[in-house]
Image (tube, coloured by chain):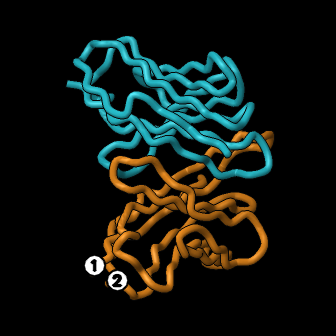
Chain colours: A orange, B cyan
Amino acid sequence: AQSVAQPEDQVNVAEGNPLTVKCTYSVSGNPYLFWYVQYPNRGLQFLLKYITGDNLVKGSYGFEAEFNKSQTSFHLKKPSALVSDSALYFCAVRTGTSGGYNKLIFGAGTRLAVHP
Amino acid sequence: SQTIHQWPATLVQPVGSPLSLECTVEGTSNPNLYWYRQAAGRGLQLLFYSVGIGQISSEVPQNLSASRPQDRQFILSSKKLLLSDSGFYLCAWSWIAGSYEQYFGPGTRLTVT
């Protein structure tokens, strides 16, 4: 079965320090992987995706993610955290069939808290 | 550019009352459309998806239904709400081919009392 796991309910980091939010996946075939961010009472915002190519993917707001096929991981990273990065982060994997149907499976989410 | 709208933003409804939530997408044509429910501010549950007008697929059996009367309009409905229908409802769209990410609307907070 295809799945995605976010092993940490919450990640705490001091402002200015690097941050990592972890994600591991299990899919058959090539993985299509995504990161989203959600601020309170808002919809999810797309941050970045890995489809193919370079293992390091750059996205919005200074975030990047590293795809590691051998470890089946797609961790989200940022070199220097901001208090405004505090939010709920979701990893997702595409499981849809061909023909344009893009079904995503989402992880349970990781709450990032950046402290001043 | 594309935008996605949902309304209402918040809704408080008594048990047993009907429900209609609306989602519209601008700036694209023939998108895939999705309804999700998010409970307790965490995981997302896919409720319905649609690949075209009148084409609705349900992911889980439940008290809700969906319709797509126009290409860029997606409606979530219920004839009689249950307490368990409370939650944050999110609509999303994606391109039918090429790019695979989904883009989400601002959501509707539904409280059933």
Query: Which residue: 36% across, 39% down?
Result: B88
Q: Is residue A55 above or below residue A1?
A: below
Disc 1 to disc 2, C-alpha distance: 6 Å
Query: Which residue: 74% across, 43% down?
Result: A97
> Most extreme residue toward the bottom, as rendered?
A17
* Res B95 quadrant in image: top right
Q: Position of residue B13 (x, y in %)?
A: 26, 21
Give the amino acid at mark 2. Answer: Glu
Provide the chain ID for the residue under circle 2: A
The reply, left or right, for residue A13 in relation to residue B33 is left
Query: Which residue: 34% across, 83% down?
Result: A15
Q: Residues within 10 Å of mark 1 (few under 14, many from 20)?
A: some
Q: Is residue B16 above or below residue B26?
A: above
Q: Are marks 1 and 2 in contact (CB under 8 Å)?
A: yes
Q: Residues within 10 Å of mark 2 (few under 14, many from 20)?
A: some
Give the amino acid at mark 1. Answer: His
> Most extreme residue toward the left, as rendered?
B113
Residue for badge 2: A15
* Res B28 quadrant in image: top right
Q: Is residue A95 above or below residue B4?
A: below
Say which of B14 and A60 sits in front: A60
Residue for badge 1: A115
1 and 2 marks on the same chain: yes
Q: Secondary structure at mark 2?
A: loop
* Res A53 quadrant in image: bottom right
Q: Which mark is residue A30?
A: none
Provide the chain ID for the residue under circle 1: A
